[in-house]
Image (cartoon, helix red, strand yellow):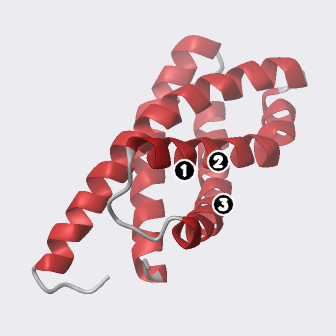
Amino acid sequence: MRSVKERLLHSALFEAGGLVLVTPLANLVSGHGLGKLGTLGVALATVAMGWNLIWNRLFDHWVPSRRRSVFERLAQALGFEAGLVVLTLPGVAWWLEIGLAEALWLDIGFVVFFLAYGLIFNTLFDRAMRRHLARGGSS
């Protein structure tokens, strides 16, 4: 089982990396300003970090292994993203002053990006943690 400390590290690294990558991409695709998207990104990352802690804690109970199959990784990523869309869609529409349908399309773009990013990040993070723990580090 992963510790709260490990989950906090995971969430912080995941969200920081995601913000650095997705904000300029969202600007190119949506035409919304970097400042507005950056502020939205920080707000969404904050919500996502809380949701990430909750979701991954639940997922760890359902699949308590550090060696997960691609199917299990995909289920982890899809469940997280679906929950995040439900939590954030109204706020995205409000902040960007767009309709729910347009916000949903923007969110779908984020989901596609973060599914791929999450799959890669989670695999690399678990490998790094296995190495750290094998060297006698704490989780």
* SS under mark 2: helix
The quarter of the rendered structure image containing the N terminus is bottom left
Percent across and percent down for residue 67 are 32, 60
Q: What residue lies at 50% left-to-right and 41% top-to-bottom?
A: 74
Q: Amino acid at mark 1?
A: Gln
Tell me which residue sits at (71%, 42%) in the image: 82
Q: Which residue has dot 1 on it? A: 76
**Mark nearer the N terminus (2 vs 3):** 3
Identify the residue at horizontal 63%, vertical 58% (top origin).
46
Which residue does the image show at 87% across and 34% down from the upper left?
A: 94
Which quadrant, please, contains the C terminus?
bottom left
Disc 2 versus disc 1: distance between alpha carbons? 5 Å
Q: Upstream in the sequence, badge 1 or badge 3?
A: 3
- Tag on residue 79? 2
Q: Is residue 30 above or below residue 61?
A: above
Assess disc 1: are there few (<14), some (14-19) or many (≥20) residues with their C-alpha within 10 Å of its C-alpha.
many
Which of the pair 39/119 is nearer the observer?
119
